[in-house]
Image: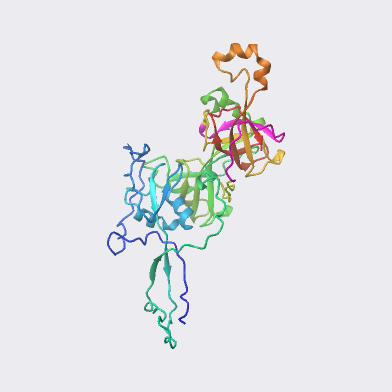
Amino acid sequence: MAKLIQAALLILTGLVFSAGTGLAEPKDQVPKQGPPPRHLKQLPDGHWSANQPQAATEGYEVHTVKNGETLWEITRQYLKDPLLWPQVWELNPSIVNPHWIYPGDQLLLKKMVVVAPTPETSVPEAASGESNPPSAAPPSGQTVLTPVQEAPATPPAPAAVASLSQIYCAGFFTADEIRPGMVIAEGEEAENKTLLYDHDVVYINKGALVGVKPGDEYLVIRKYTHYSRYGPDVAKASSQSRYGFGYKDLGRVRILLAHENSATAEIIFACETLQVGDILIPNESRVAPVDRPQAPFDKFAPPSDKTRGQIFFAKEYKTVIGKGDIIYADVGQQQSVQPGDYFRVIRYFNSSNISAFNRDDYRKYRQTYDAVRKVIGEAVVLRVEAKTITALVTYSTTEISLGDGVELE
């Protein structure tokens, strides 16, 4: 029998067959990122984009871009190597500029395998009476391109309940104020722009003297301020004695060069635009909780008699909250809450949330109204601090509001 061909599996999306038989030619040059395109258009499916609509193609996996995702992160998610993003771009000629993709854009992805033969492969003579001798190996130094073969049926691995963008862009409230030690001091193109984007080069105010070295990664955050601008309900989140200090997650940078008292870094992931003065903190690994099996939502679920709290803030100062939004509630490590815990979102009637045309009824039947308990959604915990949680709303039957309760399931 011929020796078994050793397979070195490499995920290559750029190795895709064109309409003929040759491989697609690489694009000549990656365009500069530049400022956001100004002239977006609404595509037939309803989303707005600077790119052309992408038609699904047989044999390709289709990924719909979510809010905050980049080509870098999508490539990391599917191909486990973000440096392969140019091959993903090559597969999607509808994307005009790889720096600018939009929620709702559809990307085509195709996985291929490169099979490398052993250097010395010989074909033995067919045994006596053997009608079908083994196939000859390809010539030395060549590779065979073949689609990924279906693996034997195995139970699917549990899916993550949140995307990497949701995990790394969720933000948090912490009891301890984070002092701005390391900050973004300037952008490489400071003479042309003040807002900073994915893959921009920035300068940091600290360097090798405090241990900064090439290859280090840091998270970029910004303190929430001016709560009162967004109304009295949002203003309650400014109570530092109750909730601590709120911080936005903005993205991540990687150090390219480290001098004594400064460093040069590249923005490798951005949740939104960054700017001078944004704070750098050490990188941390964040894990998305595993999604649980789907079960019918029980809007009449009885009280669990477990940890209870209240939603006091939502990401981006939102006051109308629904599925996919990030919320913050006043329970945490002190109540033994852990990432991956699920909370029901509960609404109780009271004088502050009863509608204007029901207030006469409320006054008349107050005892009944005060006893009503509505289960209106659920959320999964992404991050836990001493007194607060950051959670992702996974389901809602109606608009969730600041002040609604949460109850550990």
Magenta stretch, main secondary structure class: loop
When asked about the image quadrant of residue 88, the answer is bottom left
Q: Position of residue 20 (x, y in %)?
A: 27, 62
* Residue at image location 64% in from the left, 19% down from the top: 369
Camera-side residue of 208 and 281? 281
Q: In the rendered view, would you say 194 is above or below 114?
A: above
- For the record, the magenta segment spans 292-316
Q: In the rendered view, would you say 233 is above or below 262?
A: above
Locate residue 241 relative to residue 216 in the image: left or right. right
When asked about the image quadrant of residue 298, the answer is top right
Q: In the rendered view, would you say 295 is above or below 118?
A: above
Residue 200 in view of the camera: no
When asked about the image quadrant of residue 85, the answer is bottom left
Q: Position of residue 40 (x, y in %)?
A: 33, 38
Q: Position of residue 401 (x, y in %)?
A: 56, 27
The residue furthest bottom is 128
Camera-side residue of 154 and 259? 154
Q: Is residue 298 magenta?
A: yes
The residue furthest left is 20
Camera-side residue of 293 and 241? 293
Residue 328 in view of the camera: yes
Locate residue 249 relative to residue 104 in the image: left or right. right
- Quadrant where the C terminus is found in the figure: top right
Q: Is residue 242 magenta?
A: no
Q: Position of residue 114 (x, y in %)?
A: 42, 68
* Residue at image location 37% in from the left, 74% down from the top: 142
